[in-house]
Image (cartoon, grey):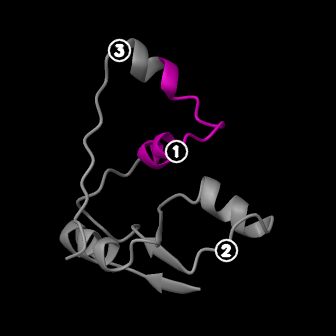
Amino acid sequence: MDLLRPSTWADALEFGARHPDASPITGGTDVMTEINTGHRRPSTLLDLTRVDERNRATLGGTMVTTSPVCNGYPPLVSSGAEMDLDRLEAS
């Protein structure tokens, strides 16, 4: 398993574009559980812990993976919250 460790958001987007199959990881709640139980073995992890521009919370990752452990949905939906996502397409 390869590990990519960008230090800026621009690098993270670039790495993600070059490695579209990479699994982004910050907190690891879902990805590490799947790896440890043998349900998933990604070829590449994109470690976002050193990216200063990112939000320190990992709620975004839990939301986009539709994790059943996410208890953040009700307050976000009821308050009308919005989420902005960035993605750089491979060229």
Q: Is residue 7 above or below residue 53?
A: below
Answer with left or right where residue 10 lies relative to residue 74.
Answer: left
Q: Amino acid at mark 1?
A: Thr
Quadrant housing residue 34? bottom right
Nearest to the eye among marks 2 and 3: give it: 2
What is the C-alpha distance between the residues marked 2 and 1?
18 Å
Disc 2 is placed on an element classified as loop
Between disc 2 and disc 3, whose residue precedes? 2
Q: Residue furthest top?
A: 78
Residue displayed at 80% across by 64% down: 37
Q: Which mark is residue 62?
A: 1
The residue labelled by disc 3 is 79
Q: At numbered mark 3, what does the secondary structure look like: helix, strand or loop?
A: loop
Q: Which residue is mark 2?
A: 41
Q: Is residue 65 left or right of residue 68?
A: left
x, y percent for residue 45:
50, 75
Q: Which residues are magenta?
A: 58-74
Q: Amino acid at mark 3?
A: Ser
63 is higher (above) or lower (below) than 10: above
- Snapshot quadrant of residue 29: bottom right
Q: In this rendered view, identify the residue nearer to me: 19 or 75.
A: 19
Q: CA distance from mark 2 to mark 3?
A: 36 Å
- Give the image location of residue 56, x and y in percent: 37, 52
Q: Describe residue 49's horizontal placement relative to residue 12 as left or right.
A: right
Give the farthest residue toward the right: 37
Side of 55 where 37 appears, left or right = right
